[in-house]
Amino acid sequence: MFKKLIISEQLIDLVTHHHDAFILLTIIAIRARRKPFHGLEARQAQIGDWKKCGFTEQRYRSTKRQLAEYGIATFKTTNKGTIATLCDSRYYDINEIENNGQDNEQITNQQRTNNEQITCNKKKEVRSKEVRSKDLKEKRGRFTPPMPSQVDEYIAEYTKAKQITLDFDGDKFCANYEAVNWFRGKTKISDWKGCVRYWVSNHNSKPEQQPCNMTVFSKRK
């Protein structure tokens, strides 16, 4: 037989701010029946010996009132003394025995196993979504440097659409950016076509059209 103290935020708050309430609750949990016996139902305990518990009568009454107000326990006065009934299982698991004789420990263990399985499955599902999301981001952000022929083909299509005549060398373009590991300033290039358009725009803004000579940057360290 065991009775388990359940560590939770509610318990910590009770111990920290309502010490007397925690002490009386512990006494009730220790005395509480696990199954009906001698006129007491499961989860019920006989109390009233407040002096033996270290309380004054005033503290004892005040503490009972607190537990009742918080919905943790109820109290009933009888000719045999006060009967306390535990109402909130967030603080103590008294390992109650069901009427069919099955111990709550078995039920609790099965519930715990089921909950752990559900939690494990949820974690796997979340992890799977995170991996898929990461792969998708990496796929979107992955940059493949173009071949000079691809650059020449794109610039031909672009200048034709813009009705621009331009001397542009795909080999020089690729060599220029390969020298700086495909960085522009401190930013890694993700769209080489955008760089091509930038060069074209920069060239067209000049007063005289000259062959599109590209500045070769020093290699990044």
Image (tube, rainbow, N blue to C red):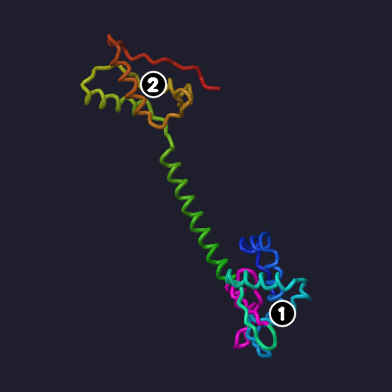
Q: Which residue is mark 1?
A: 48
Residue 180 horizontal/vertical position (percent): 48, 22
Query: Residue 115: which quarter of the image?
Result: bottom right
In what quadrant of the picture does the C terminus appear?
top right
- CA separation in Å, label 2 and label 1: 92 Å
Q: Residue at x 60, y 88 (%)?
A: 100
Q: Name, please, the residue furthest toward the front.
A: 58
Q: Mark 1 or mark 2, which is nearer the start of the sequence?
A: 1
Question: Which residue is more in the foreground, 188 or 43?
Answer: 43
Residue 110 lies within the magenta run: yes
Residue 177 lies within the magenta run: no
Query: Residue 216: which quarter of the image?
Result: top left
Mark 2 or 1: in front is 1
* Residue 135 marker: none
Range shown magenta: 82-111
Query: Residue 37: which quarter of the image?
Result: bottom right
Q: Residue at x 30, y 28 (%)?
A: 154
Q: Which residue is mark 2?
A: 173
Residue 143 horizontal/vertical position (percent): 43, 34
Could you tell me which secondary element the residue under label 2 belongs to?
helix
- Residues packed near mark 1 inside 10 Å, few (<14), some (14 to 19) or many (20 plus): some
Residue 160 horizontal/vertical position (percent): 22, 24
Residue 84 horizontal/vertical position (percent): 65, 79
In what quadrant of the picture does the N terminus appear?
bottom right
Asked whether, in this view, residue 219 is left or right of residue 32, the answer is: left
Question: Which residue is more in the foreground, 118 or 159?
Answer: 118
Up-down relation of residue 144 to residue 216 (above or below) = below
Identity of the amino acid at label 2? Answer: Phe
